[in-house]
Image (cartoon, grey):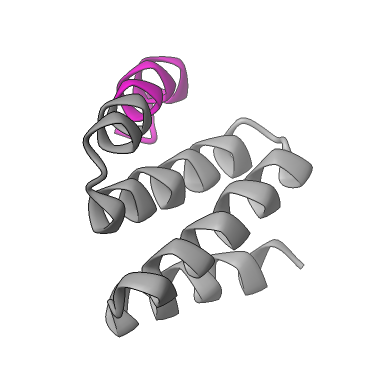
Amino acid sequence: DLNRPDEALVHASKAREVHQACGTRRDLGCALRALGLIAARRGDPVAAAAHLREAVRTLDEVGDVQEARRAAQDLRRLS
């Protein structure tokens, strides 16, 4: 829930750790996108952009075109 960014950060960070460890790259990309949105909500556009760029790259690599586009749109909104 982006209305509770501190709590969301804890959950998204844990998801990133789990998916990195398991090698579930699509889910890792989604966790990175969530971290980007959370960082943006918390007022950290630098961290948001870094997470979203990594999300786009990861999602492109696994062929999830729709999620990669969503992450790219989120990244453009930061500008």
* Residue at x 42%, y 80% (from the top left corner): 69
Residue 61 included in the magenta stretch of the image:
no
**Residue 15 occupies which quadrant of the picture?**
top left
Which portion, as a residue range, is magenta? 1-14
Which quadrant of the figure has residue 3? top left
Name the residue at 32% across, 53% down. 30
Closer-to-camera residue (27/45): 27
Residue 34 image position (x, y, % from top left): 40, 44
Q: How many marks?
A: 0
Q: Position of residue 12 (x, y in %)?
A: 35, 30
Give the side of residue 21 with respect to residue 6, left or right: left
- Compared to residue 17, the image places residue 41 above or below, namely below
Residue 9 located within the stretch drawn in magenta:
yes
In this rendering, the answer to whether 60 lies above or below 14 is below
Image coordinates for residue 19, horizontal then vertical, percent: 27, 37
Considering only vertical position in the picture, is 73 above or below 14? below
Question: Which quadrant, please, contains the N terminus?
Answer: top left
Q: Residue at x 35, y 26 (%)?
A: 17
Dividing the image into 4 quarters, which one contains the C terminus? bottom right
Foreground residue, 20 or 66? 20
User: Which residue shows up at 48% across the image and 58% down it?
Assistant: 55
Magenta span main SS: helix
